[in-house]
Every structure is written in structure tokens, then in C-alpha cells.
Image: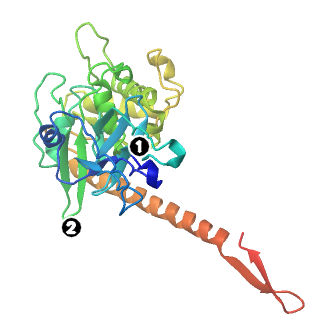
Amino acid sequence: MGLPRMGGQGGNGGDVLVVAKKDLTLKRVKDKYPNKRFVAGVGTNSSIRALKGAKGADVEILAPVGICVTADDGRTLGELNHDGEKVLVAKGGVGGSFNSGFLPATGQNRHIRLDLRLIADLGLVGFPNAGKSSLLTALSHARPQIASYPFTTLRPEIGKVMYEDHKQVSVADLPGLIEGAHVNRGMGHKFLKHVERTKQLVFVVDVCGFQLASKTPFRSAFEAVQLLTKELELYKEELLSKPAILVVNKMDLPEAKEKFRELETQLENQEELSHLLPEDKPKSFLHFKHTVPVSAMTGLGLPHLKAVIRKSLEEEEANESERHRIEKLEMLRRKIPVVSKTTWGQPHSEPLD
């Protein structure tokens, strides 16, 4: 608060910020801040030596890289994708001044939520028991829990696919979806929020189809693909703009080759065969960059899948670089004028179109 007789001004209150720090986990954040309440410093009064009081101390909340910060109304305040990035979550109040009758303003009071979303090159998308965990184990050194019953994966697992030239690709095995995940059934949003933070999607389906429980309908591999597409579409339609690879697993089963040929035919004629699908079918059908038959159990097709994964990522990186180059060139063309001479020999500027 300012001193009225001197016409001074009080210092502004401190701000509260969330700061990304690598090698930090949410558990460590929770252990460090058990009260989950943060208060920034109060600005000081003006004085004879300083007509404007000092600003209150800021408070920084350290959080892992990959955090999404949302307000209590669901509005996204920011994302922390790199070490050292900051998001202002609550601004300090303005100090008292002549215009405010030397009464300071109250700072922001806000409830925030920190969601850690995985950052991986690829995200494995599939219904329970499709073999995602087995596939991740076969492709990388990750050791997720594997069993013959659904919902083995209860939390995301990250594996690194290694190549002979030491290239590494990160792959996330995400908890299995169920029909209705977009309305938060099963793992629901806990799964889907991680899908947003992967560069590309890898759909994993059982070539012979699956049945979640005795009272639920049997789904063929073709139906599984379309139902997965629908769940992603209903949660956030932009997810379907990501490049996608289809992995058809369990090719070691007796009828696998015949089932795979049937699936290929169905995928080539998705629109014509849409009547075979449940009523809740996707608005648009997803066309995969690659369809790869594999057996995570025997290793069949895995070398080819590794090559396809790398090729797909490198193609997307090249496309992204070209898009940035074109955007930068267009920006420069708008900014830099072309200098030419008029018929009278005087310089004349024209914008580059």
C-alpha cells in the first residue's frame, strides 16, 4: 500500500508460475507440495527512499516436461514441452496508487490442474488384448505387464526402438480403449489425453477379432479398426489427422492368413461395406499409410514393421521441414520489397508477390 502523504505507490503482488524441469515426476511434485497451495509474495509499501514499493516475490511450481496446465473451468492455460518453459497461472494484484486511493488490488485466486501427457513418436492404439504390450516388448527393451486377460496395461509404458545406426524411436503402449471411451468409460480420457501427444498413431488389432466379455458383441478386425477410429473421432477429431499405421497382430494363429486377406479387401472397400458396421460408425474412414501383418509372439513381420515405422517418421519430418521452409519463404516475400528502376531512372519499390 502506498503512503498518501508522499503520493507513493505500493508494489505489485508476486505472480505464480509453473516451470518445466526435466527429470522430474508428478510423484515428486506431489511429495514436495503436499498442501497443494501456493501463495506469492506481497508487494512492499512505498517509502522515503523508494516512492514505488518493491514487487512481491514470485512463486515457481516445478513440474515435469510434458505438462498441460488447465484452469478449474477447463480452459487450457498453457503447455510445457521443453525444459525451462513457464506458464503464468495467477497474476499478482496491482499495488495501491493515487488513482486507486492507495488501495491495492487483490491478486488472482485460481485452481489449476496439471496433466502429464506423454511425448512419444508413436502411440499404440487398440482394444484390450490386441497384443500391444507384447508388441512393445518385441520391438523394444520395455517390459510391460503381459497376461491373457484384458486391461493388463493400466498405465502408459514407453519403449525405445533401437536401430543399427543408433537411431531411437519412442513408442508408447497406452491402456486399451473400450467402446464408449470418449465419454470416459473404462480408462477413457486417461488414455485419450496421451494420444494427443504422439506424433503418429499405430492401430493394433487382433487379426481374428475380439470379444471383451461374454455379454459383449464379437468384433471382427475390420469392425475393431472402425470402432477405434470412431472413439478417437468423438474425443477429438483432429487426432485423425495424424499419420497412422495399421498393425495386424497374431498372424501365428491358424486362420490368420485368410482373415488378413479378408481385412485387406474390406479396408479397400470401406465405404461400400459400411453397412456391416455397428450403427455408431465413424463420419470418415481412416486410410492407413501402411498395413503390416505381424506376430508379436513369433517375431513374424517385426523387422519390416521397424523399417516402416522409421520410414513413416522420416517422411513426416521431411514434409514438416518443407512446410516450414515454404512458410518462411512466403513470410520473407511479404516483408522484403523488390527494388527496380522506373523509366526515369529513379528507384521504385514493389512488394514481392
Query: According to the image, label 1 marks what residue?
Result: 93
The image position of residue 215, as x and y in percent, is 26, 6
The image position of residue 283, as x and y in percent, is 53, 27
Viewer-side residue, 165 vs 272:
165
Residue in view at x 19 percent, y 44 percent: 158
Q: Is residue 141 left or right of residue 173?
A: left
The label number, if any, that marks residue 165 in the structure image: 2
- The extreme right residue here reads 344
Viewer-side residue, 288 vs 325:
325
Q: Is residue 268 left or right of residue 258?
A: right
Residue in view at x 19 percent, y 52 percent: 160
Secondary structure of the residue carrying numbered label 2: loop
Q: Is residue 296 above or below residue 51?
A: above
Which residue type carries mark 1?
Gly
Q: Is residue 106 above or below residue 63?
A: above
Here the colouring is: rainbow
Q: Earlier in the sequence, mark 2 or mark 1?
A: 1
- The extreme front residue here reads 5
The label number, if any, that marks residue 314 in the structure image: none
Residue in view at x 22 percent, y 8 percent: 214
Q: Is residue 194 above or below residue 52?
A: above
The quarter holding residue 89 reads top left
The image position of residue 21, as x and y in percent, is 23, 53
Residue 296 visible in image: no
Label 1: few (<14), some or many (≥20) within 10 Å? many
What is the distance, in whole Å, between disc 2 and disc 1 at their CAs? 55 Å
